[in-house]
Image (cartoon, rainbow, N blue to C red):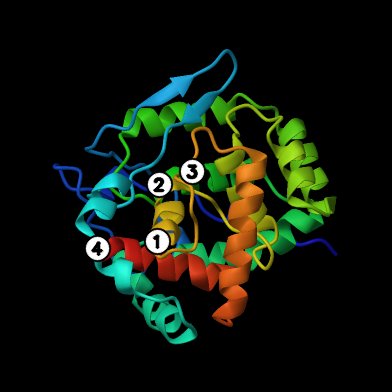
């Protein structure tokens, strides 16, 4: 029997954000308190619009830009990623990411849900919402909504077909080819779908993760604009190699890098 998940979660609520735009979310959030909500963001994030889709410009990754971090030589410049470091940072993740509990639930539930094909519109929409809303307080509400609204122009049947094709795909290129046909889905957002379809083999790409890996000496190039499928494949190869070296999952490495960036 297929497992039906009729929207396992939703947006963040305005009630969880103070008047100055700072998150007041608790460290542990259940799926119930996470439903039917919204977030406002105080800092600007320019976006570009093309004829049919909205495209992310690089997302901020803490208070410093990639150039500023390189210029000041942050703490990560002398840090080496090891199994012990990843474990330590993972344990600190709930302290810096208020959505950690709901993320963990989705990492556990969505792969089976997407594989079964038995899910609703909002289950897939949650992935697009998560991509921007995990940057608590760093993306303007209007810009984030523009991206989500572009995705909302898709028909449910088209979304279902794209995800089904991605589930059956054997490579990142095939998954990207299936997902990026959707309105509002560029390579970074498609990578978020890949992560929640198959978290054992895929991970999301964003400027924060990329810049942290680069500062740690794992990547040479700056975050590309826009992110191409080829760039994502190179990033993914690096991510997998680092995770294997550190004897950890891609998801654990993601959380560790998020904490390292937050500490800058």
**To which residue does mark 3 refer?**
129
Give the x, y percent position of residue 259.
35, 67
Element marked by disc 4:
loop
Q: Residue at 46% of width from left, 53% of height from top? A: 210
Query: Closer to the N terminus: mark 4 or mark 2?
Result: 4
Query: Closer to the N terminus: mark 1 or mark 4?
Result: 4
Q: Which circle, 4 or 2, is nearer the viewer?
A: 4
Image quarter (top left, top right, bottom left or bottom right) of the C terminus: bottom left
Packing grade of label 3 (10 A; few <14, some 14-19, many >=20) is: many
Element marked by disc 2:
helix
Element marked by disc 1:
loop
Packing grade of label 1 (10 A; few <14, some 14-19, many >=20) is: many
Contact check, label 4 and label 2, Cβ < 8 Å: no
Inter-mark Cα distance, 1 to 4: 26 Å
**To which residue does mark 2 refer?**
133
Give the x, y percent position of residue 230.
66, 43
Give the x, y percent position of residue 112.
73, 63
Residue closer to the observer: 77 or 99: 77
**To which residue does mark 4 refer?**
74
Inter-mark Cα distance, 4 to 2: 26 Å
């Amino acid at each position: 029997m297929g497992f039906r998940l009729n929207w396992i979660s939703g947006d963040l609520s305005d009630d969880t954000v103070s008047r100055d735009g700072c998150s007041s979310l608790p460290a542990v959030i259940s799926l119930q308190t996470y439903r039917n909500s919204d977030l406002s963001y105080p800092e600007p994030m320019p976006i570009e619009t093309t004829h049919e889709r909205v495209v992310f410009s690089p997302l901020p990754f803490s208070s410093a830009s990639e150039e500023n971090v390189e210029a000041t030589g942050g703490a990560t410049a002398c840090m080496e990623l090891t199994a012990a470091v990843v474990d330590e940072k993972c344990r600190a993740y709930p302290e810096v990411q208020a959505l950690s509990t709901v993320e963990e639930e989705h990492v556990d539930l969505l792969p089976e849900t997407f594989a079964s094909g038995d899910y609703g519109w909002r289950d897939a929409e949650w992935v697009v919402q998560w991509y921007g809303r995990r940057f608590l307080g760093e993306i303007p509400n209007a810009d984030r909504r523009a991206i989500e609204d572009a995705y909302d122009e898709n028909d449910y049947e088209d979304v279902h077909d794209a995800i089904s094709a991605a589930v059956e795909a054997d490579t990142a290129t095939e998954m990207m080819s299936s997902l990026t046909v959707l309105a509002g889905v560029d390579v970074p957002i498609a990578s978020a779908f890949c992560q929640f379809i198959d978290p054992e083999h895929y991970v999301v790409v964003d400027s924060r993760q990329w810049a942290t890996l680069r500062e740690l000496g794992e990547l040479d190039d700056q975050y590309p604009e826009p992110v191409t499928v080829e760039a994502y494949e190179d990033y993914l190869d690096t991510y997998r190699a680092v995770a294997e070296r550190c004897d950890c999952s891609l998801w654990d490495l993601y959380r560790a890098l998020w904490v390292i960036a937050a500490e800058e």
